[in-house]
Amino acid sequence: MTRVRRGYIARRRRTKIRLFASSFRGTHSRLTRTITQQKIRALVSAHRDRDKKKRDFRRLWITRINAVIRDKEVYVSYSKFIHDLYKRQLLLNRKILAQIAILNRNCLYMIYNEIIKKKIGKNPSK
């Protein structure tokens, strides 16, 4: 009986998976079954950590804004500052506010003065 040469589709699929795992260490880059398990695990981690990265950056921006606000007692707290920003319709996102807070504090103080002016203009009793 003559020898049957199998097709290349399975081999192509395995080499594709091997290329994905070529940077993994040890068995994780050599054995096909382990490679597929590690690929699934890596993709799950990547998907989970994309959302986590967004949360972490938001926390960092909030921490930076809060530190600058409390530094010279511009505001009592971060939450009141953000609340007044929204009330006065000065729509700046936290990323931009954090960059302003770090790079140019005087600009943040100008924003604060703008809020205070509008606050005093609307309620003269306060």
Image (spheres, helix red, strand yellow):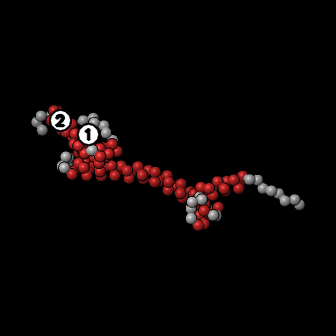
Q: Position of residue 11 (x, y in %)?
A: 71, 56
Left or right: 67 as drawn, with respect to 38? left
* Kind of residue at badge 2: Lys
Q: Which mark is residue 57?
A: none
Secondary structure, mark 2, is: helix
Residue at x-position 67% and y-position 53%: 13
Q: Could you say which quadrant of the image residue 6 lies in?
A: bottom right
Label 2 crowd bin: few (<14), some (14–19), many (20+), radius 10 Å:
few
Q: Is residue 77 visible?
A: no
Tell me which label, 1 or 2, sits earlier in the chain: 1
Quadrant of the image containing the N terminus: bottom right
Q: Could you say which quadrant of the image residue 124 lies in?
A: top left
Mark 1–mark 2 distance (CA, rounded to whole Å) = 12 Å
Q: Which mark is residue 85?
A: 1
Left or right: 62 as drawn, with respect to 50? left
Q: Could you say which quadrant of the image residue 33 lies in?
A: bottom right
Q: Position of residue 19 (x, y in %)?
A: 62, 56
* Kind of residue at badge 1: Leu
Label 1 crowd bin: few (<14), some (14–19), many (20+), radius 10 Å:
some
Nearer to the camera, 61 or 78: 61
- Do tag 1 and tag 2 residues touch (Cβ < 8 Å)? no
Taking the view exactly as shown, the residue that stands out farthest to the top is: 121
Nearer to the camera, 111 or 102: 102
Image depth: mark 1 or mark 2 in front: 2
The residue at which mark 2 appears reads as 117
Residue at x-position 30% and y-position 52%: 63
Secondary structure, mark 1, is: helix
Q: Is residue 65 visible?
A: yes
Please say if 70 is above or below 28.
above
